[in-house]
Image (cartoon, rainbow, N blue to C red):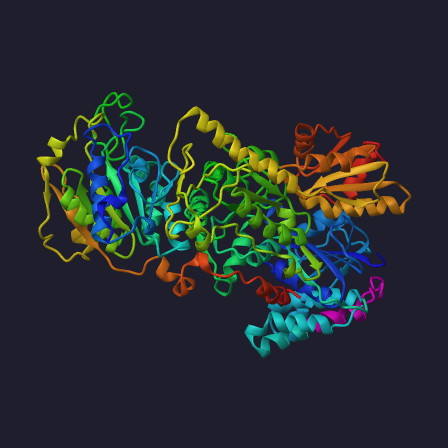
Amino acid sequence: MVSIEDYGKFETAWCPGCGNFGILKAIKQALVNLGKEPSEVLIASGIGQSSKLPHYLKCNAFNGLHGRSLPPATGAKVANHELTVLAVTGDGDCYGEGGNHFLHTVRRNPDITMIVHDNQIYGLTKGQASPTSEVGMKTKVQTHGVFNMPLNPLSLAISLDCSFVSRGYAGNIPHLTGLIEKAIQHKGLSLVDVLQPCVSFNKLNTFKWYSERVYEMEDTGYELDDRVKAFERSLEWGDEIPLGVFYVNEKPSFEDHQEVLRSGPLYRNVPRTEMVNELMDGLI
Amino acid sequence: MNIDLNLKIGGAAGQGLQTTGMALAKTLKESGFHVFATQYYLSRVRGGHNTFQIRISDSSVYAMTEDVDLLLALDPDSIEQHLSEVRDGVVIVDADVIEVKDPSNMIFHVPMLKIAKDVCGDKIYSNSVSMGSIIGLLCLELSDLEKVLTLSFKKKGEDIIQKNIDAARAGYNYVKDNYPGGCKFAVSEPKEKEGMMLVNGNQAVGLGALAAGVQFLAAYPMTPSTGVMTYVAANADKFNVVVEQAEDEIAALNMVLGASFAGARSMTTTSGGGFSLMAEALGLASITETPSVIFLCQRPGPATGLPTMTEQGDLQFVLNAAQGEFPRCILAPGTPADCFYLTAEAFNIADKYQIPVFVLSDQYLADSLFTLPKFDTSKVTVERHLLSDQELRTKKEEYKRYKLTPMGISPRALPGQEGVLVVADSDEHDEFGHINEDPDNRIKMNDKRMNKLEVLREEMPAPKIYGKQDASITLIGWGSTYGPLAEVVDQLNEKGKSVNLVHFTHIHPLPIEHVRRSLSKAKRTVCVENNSTGQFARLLKVDADIDVTEKVLRYDGKPFSPEFILNALKEKEVI
């Protein structure tokens, strides 16, 4: 039986009180609850405070480039679909630098769980606006306050028919753990956008600010595969911010479409060097 | 070479130029000739005038010449632009359709549309009429063309096949009855038909990748590289390959790295513009020591440049792309056989040294058709250099993905293997793969990576010497220029000159000792390159401290012909 100790304890480079700690704890607990051994898990990440996470638990890890957690995660999942693949990223990494990969990975629908540490600010570069920063937020770069409309990750994902769309909160670890478990169990791309207070740079969206607004959706009041209703619900933001699963659409994953994977992981196939002769005969 | 004949077909896009050209090339190969064919797309503003050129010979032929013997003119531009290339030859033209302003005795009118309508009831068959008329001019039998037409139209049914054959025969008979020069262009069919392939550079790269057991290919389409992606995709099901069209080149190489990290033999295909977007991930491949093969098919830049033409303009870019210092390997094929064997070799080098390896081709090699014997698959080995489960079980210490070793190569395990965790990082890292900013560690890790380049350098073979060992003039070339350069060597030596060619396929890391030995006896060296600055000559200077005497450069978007090189050598008073 796998236990939380199997995932180890590491010194981190995060600020004391950072929302990332709650997310790390929830990921570990979810993996333990699902009985996943560290060697079965691959975490791909990009660059940012969030993307350091795979260094803080025992697992296989591919800590790649800024904005580029999803393409390597997709490649790895195709190469060995027996791995449980998570992509851990942030609002700048995933919705800014890697926006195009986000759009197209949703379309591709590989069986990957995306965990987006959404703190509405750039932490690693010390406090510039992110794609989800609120209008009016002043920073050292956005000196007159942010003009650009914030990106709504959930609405965007639902509009693209992402197969699993959810929101968690770093300050509610039991709820977040449950969400991550569901997301990992879901076959296809699952998005867990996690509201994450940044104690150093985001003085607006603090633990207090979130705690006063977030609530767990007991019942969405609509079937989870109702895309229009889910989209409508995803627009709810302000005094009341819903947490939970917004949208689920069971559909074939990227790997399901690859017939070659039915006989086992791609990387284990034996080369068919001699068969190239048949192709060459066709050129004669 | 007893037979050396050059056919050119010119026409507008959409006139079935490629179909006609391919069918003729196949027919002539079927008849036992050695065939070399190129396609050329001229500037689009002038109406998309394209050409398909076929050179036939009774011995192997690897280059295109400029003088045309038979010009099939399917549009007015063909006559305007190419009439001057025809010397003592013939221009076949349907004068009912194309106005011939300057009737000369070279022009031979074949009423292709009328024949097609009369014989088959539809002008659509005029291309087959034109094919028949060319076979008639060459005074060959029609049977090989009939065979090729039968195969080409197999899916369309008996009726269509028969109509195309009837059209070809009518064109053939028309020429026999009406061409005043009789059998002026008669070529005797070679007796030995060797079962040669008709293959282009991109197909050969695709074949090489499949032979090497490629398992994953992610790419974004870009001319002139796309042929490899489509060739592998067409055969993916048979060969257990997953091919994915990425959203951009950034995603393509990053996907490749993820797949390779998890154990799949992986490659991407692109051209210079796409590779510009991959530069960041190239560094990632190198610092994470993830094997990857990048097929880069050059076209003239910068930016969009000349999308359908050729150049060897990306060598210095590929040598230096991305921030920081790190090992990479560059292989540049000179022939489709090189394309096949070097692509397979690229995968083995990538796996052994855990580095990115380039196969650097160009539009000319990618799209030119060559007749060649089948490649020898028994010469292809698949060497993965991976730790087995058994080896991992017997290991006592905790697995270190970046274990420091004398050669710099760390034993590679895969995520998912029992008892190991594999951690890769784009940050500088320690032996376990975790972020580490310690200066001493940095030096060790940097040296470890760079040392792999020196070990690989020892393994890189000497350049190929074509012609005699000692010559008074040595031509230097790399990659796709092999064919025209070899022909220049043959022609000059036949005329009593003393010329050889030192041709490079293994470009980086340059095997410096071999290179010095190969060039130490050279008296006068001429570096011939399809670019404007002599990028390979610069590499020779920087890496091996070798100065070339002269450079012959071409950068108008066209490939070298033997004539171009000979003229340049005369101009520079080398010959």
Residue furthest to the bottom: B158
Left or right: A75 with respect to B210? left
Residue B478 inside the magenta-drawn segment: no
Q: Residue visible at 71% across and 64% down? A: B196
In this rendered view, identify the residue nearer to me: B575 or B67: B575
Residue drawn at the location 68% of the way across and 73% of the way down: B147
Which residue is farthest right? B496
Horizontally, is B335 left or right of A209 in the view?
Answer: right
Q: Is residue A46 left or right of residue B293?
A: left
Viewer-proximal residue among A207 and B89 = A207
Identify whether A192 is placed above or below B572.
Answer: below
- Residue B53 visible in the snapshot: no
Residue B284, horizontal then vertical, whole percent: 45, 38
Residue A41 spot, x, y in % from top left: 32, 49
Q: Nearer the viewer, residue B44 or B147?
A: B147
Q: Nearer the viewer, residue B230 or A47?
A: A47
Residue at image point 25% right, 51% down: A2
User: Is residue B172 a member of the stretch shown in magenta?
Assistant: yes
Q: Please give the count of numbered marks on the rendered protein.
A: 0
Counting from the top left corner in percent of width and height, residue B374 is at 68, 62
Residue B19 in which image quadrant: bottom right
Look at the picture and state if B88 lies above or below A145. Answer: below
Can residue B105 be seen in this snapshot?
Answer: yes
Left or right: A204 with respect to B131?
Answer: left
Which portion, as a residue range, is magenta?
A: B167-189
Residue A251 position, x and y percent, is: 28, 60
Residue depicted at x 64% and y 53%: B341
Q: Quadrant of the image for the C terminus of chain A?
A: bottom right
Quarter of the rendering occupied by the N terminus of chain A: bottom left
